[in-house]
Amino acid sequence: MEDNHIYQYSLLNALMDGVSETGISVSKFATKGNQGLGTFARMNGELLFLDGKVYQLQAEGNVREAGPDDQIPFAVSTQFVSQHTRTVAMNDKNAIDDALNAFKHYAKNLFMSYRVHGHFQYLKCRTVRGQEYKGQPLSELGKKQSVEEYHDVTGTIIGFRTPSNWQGFGVAGEHLHFINDERTVGGHVLELQADEVEIQIAVANNIHVELPTSEDFNSASLNTDDEGVKKVEG
């Protein structure tokens, strides 16, 4: 995979429709770069891919290394090579957007990927608990998600920023996941605060989308639900 190209399996719209029974294997996904995000079959937890290893971020903030045959119904990855590195303070999650805009303010119609590492005074993270029945939409799962708070932890946030005018196509979205250095806690970041962390940034203008061929995917409505996505992603 070429540097800073983005690979995506399936569409966010399909996930919102509850299409998550199967997908690609962890072993295949691990060949698609060096960092990424997503979820697992039946939306059981969050996926974080970092430097060759795929982790399942589970409810209550627990972490396990995923097995090679575990199924991934939706994920985004890249062969991340930083184009810019800087040290910043982050009073809240908006500081990430500020750092991205300061690097390439004219890249509003391009994709951006990033990696933040350092000591966080505060993090609030959520994880999806998994479907209670086949086809349960992500918007329903978001109402019963596990939310955890962490204080004084050191770790890594990885994320992607999608142009706002692309989100209706079901591509990528606004995602950022955290895992600590000990690989013992993590989740999708809702809130954060850090006095000083390092952020690495890259712009991407190539995206490769692989679509499922399952009956569930082909029968899904794939309607855009921007409001539902915002509620789930925080």
Image: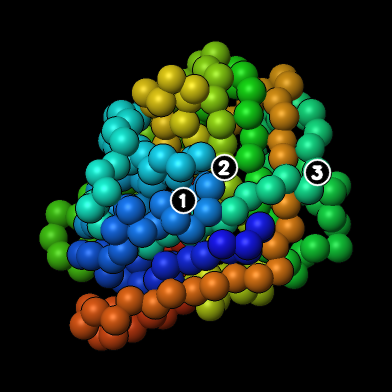
Residue 139 in percent (x, y) is at 35, 60
Which mark is first along the chain, 3 or 2?
3
**Badge 1 or badge 3: first in the primary sequence:** 1
Indicate whether 37 appears above or below 20: above
What percent of the width, then of the height, locates residue 16?
36, 67
Circles 2, 1 touching at the beta carbon (< 8 Å): yes
In front of the other: 101 or 229: 101
Q: Amino acid at mark 3?
A: His
Vertical side of 3 occupied by 210: above or below? below
Q: Position of residue 159 (x, y in %)?
A: 58, 47
Q: What label sits on residue 70 in the rendered view?
A: none
Question: Three-letter amino acid code at disc 1?
Answer: Leu
* Three-letter code, disc 2: Ile
Q: Residue at x 72, y 29 (%)?
A: 198
* Residue corresponding to mark 1: 37
Marks 2 and 3, Cα distance to the nearest angstrom?
A: 15 Å
Q: Nearer the viewer, residue 27 or 43?
A: 27
Q: Nearer the viewer, residue 54 or 162?
A: 54
Q: CA distance from mark 2 to mark 1?
A: 8 Å
Q: Which-is-in-front pick, marks 1 and 3?
A: 3
For mark 2, what is the residue?
Answer: 158
Neighbour tally class for label 3: few under 14, some 14-19, many 20 plus, Cα within 10 Å: some
Name the residue: 32% across, 53% down: 26
